[in-house]
Image (spheres, grey):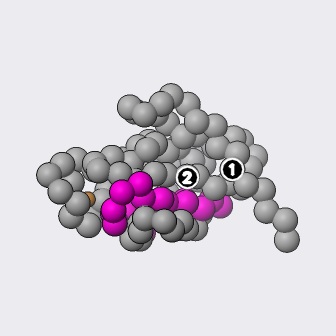
Amino acid sequence: MKRRTMAALLIGSAAGGVARLAADAPVEIRIAARKFEFHPNKVAVKRGQPLTLVLMSEDRIHGFKVPDLGLRAEIVPGQETRVALTPEKVGSFTFFCDVFCGDGHEEMDGTLIVEA
Ligand SMILES: [Cu+2]
């Protein structure tokens, strides 16, 4: 089966950039983790759109947790951590690092926005 890859449009940059999906593409969204941020830290997707989050760490082990969607993964440097999901709930969901990574760890979060 052929799979289309990376078609997310990245809008904005480091601070407050929003990764937004192109209308018709099943996609991978790449999110980089480093002390003490995710980049991008806002990701907008469509309800019912199958997607894979591809998580990478630029420095050390971080966590990726989205309690409202029941997602949790560990992000290990040198590896891609792939989290597949099809969001069915519309809303704004916080994700955050749940592996203590130093002073500033508490600020390491972002938002997954699921649009109707
Ligand atoms: Cu952390």
- Three-letter amino acid code at disc 2? Arg
Tell me if residue 39 comes above or below residue 60 in the rendering: above
The answer to the question of whether label 2 and label 1 lie on touching residues, with beta carbons closer than 8 A, is yes
Percent across and percent down for residue 104 are 18, 49
12 horizontally vs 100: left or right? right
Q: What residue range appears in magenta? A: 49-71
Q: Residue at x 58, y 52 (%)?
A: 29
- Three-letter amino acid code at disc 1? Met
Query: Mark 1 = which residue?
Result: 6
Residue 82 seen in the figure: yes
- Whether residue 34 appears in magenta in the rendering, the answer is no
Tell me if residue 79 comes above or below residue 29 in the rendering: below
Front residue of this view, candidates 29 and 20: 29
1 horizontally vs 66: left or right? right
Query: Mark 2 = which residue?
Result: 30
Residue farthest right in this picture:
1
Q: Secondary structure at mark 2?
A: strand
| Quarter occupied by residue 23 | top right
110 horizontally vs 11: left or right? left
Q: Residue at x 49, y 52 (%)?
A: 31
Q: Secondary structure at mark 1?
A: loop
| Quarter occupied by residue 14 | top left
